Image: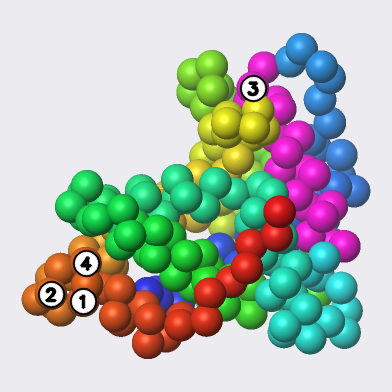
């Protein structure tokens, strides 16, 4: 379920590679430009922050986890990602189940993705474009390596304008595979296999991610 290892590793590598983006200057924008350019700028800012909080040589796994939790709280709309990843099961869940699922989902991200990050995983990364998908939504296009490289990856970042007025990531798409869509398939399969609906999924998540992650403010 919660874990297509190759896809998780690809997402982790794409996040790690963002550290190089700040130095490339791909995200600089001016006041008054489109939301898509503001979103690209936000990706650049996240790359800088990851270098300072996650990809520091010698950091322990716990330190990387705390740094990654900070990245998620500032640049990702985890509530939106959790809601979308649960798909139609979200509407059937109670408010308490939704709250617990969102907490466990965030802990899963920090432990599974944050724990895999190391400073030596950074790869050549470049932003290749961006496009507006409405007044409050955009897609930022990027890639790892060159198309001739055997490990070439295309990474797209779907973003929307959050309530606080900042662009936030709501999906990561690696070589055409959506993290949100992958999550929908995995969670749906787990719910069906458990035979206990949302409670069955939550119990499975509690077993693996019982300790909640305190998201920085």
Q: What stretch is highlighted in magenta?
A: 34-52
Q: Mark 3 points at which residue?
A: 35
Circles 2 and 4 in contact, beta carbons < 8 Å: no
Q: In this view, does 195 lie to the left or right of 181?
A: left
Residue annotated with mark 4? 198
Position of residue 116 in the picture relative to residue 195 (left or right): right
Q: Is residue 106 above or below residue 203?
A: above
Q: Which of marks 1 and 3 is in front?
A: 1
Residue occupying image coordinates x 23% and y 56%: 93
Q: Quadrant of the C terminus?
A: bottom right
Q: Residue 11 carries which label?
A: none
Name the spot of residue 108 as percent of width and height, x first.
49, 73
State the mark number for residue 200.
Answer: 1
Q: How many marks?
A: 4
| Residue 137 at x, y percent in the picture | 52, 27
Are the residues flagged by discs 4 and 1 in contact, CB closer than 8 Å? yes
């Amino acid at each position: 379920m919660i874990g297509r290892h190759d896809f998780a590793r690809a997402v982790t590598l794409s996040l790690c590679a963002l550290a190089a983006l700040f130095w490339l200057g791909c995200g600089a924008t001016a006041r008054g430009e489109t939301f898509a350019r503001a979103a690209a700028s936000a990706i650049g800012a996240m790359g800088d922050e990851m270098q300072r909080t996650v990809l520091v040589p010698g950091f322990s796994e716990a330190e990387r986890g705390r740094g990654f939790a900070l990245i998620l709280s500032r640049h990702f709309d985890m509530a939106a990602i959790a809601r979308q990843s649960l798909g139609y099961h979200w509407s059937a869940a109670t408010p308490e189940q939704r709250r617990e699922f969102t907490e466990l989902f965030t802990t899963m991200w920090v432990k599974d993705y944050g724990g895999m990050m190391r400073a030596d995983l950074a790869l050549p990364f470049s932003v290749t474009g961006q496009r507006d998908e409405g007044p409050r939504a955009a897609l930022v296009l990027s890639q790892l390596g060159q198309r001739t490289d055997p490990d070439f990856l295309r990474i797209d970042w779907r973003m929307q304008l959050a309530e606080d007025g900042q662009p936030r990531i709501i999906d990561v798409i690696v070589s055409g595979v959506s993290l949100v869509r992958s999550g929908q398939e995995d969670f749906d399969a787990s719910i069906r296999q458990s035979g206990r609906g949302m409670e069955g999924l939550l119990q499975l998540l509690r077993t693996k991610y019982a300790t909640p992650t305190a998201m920085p403010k």
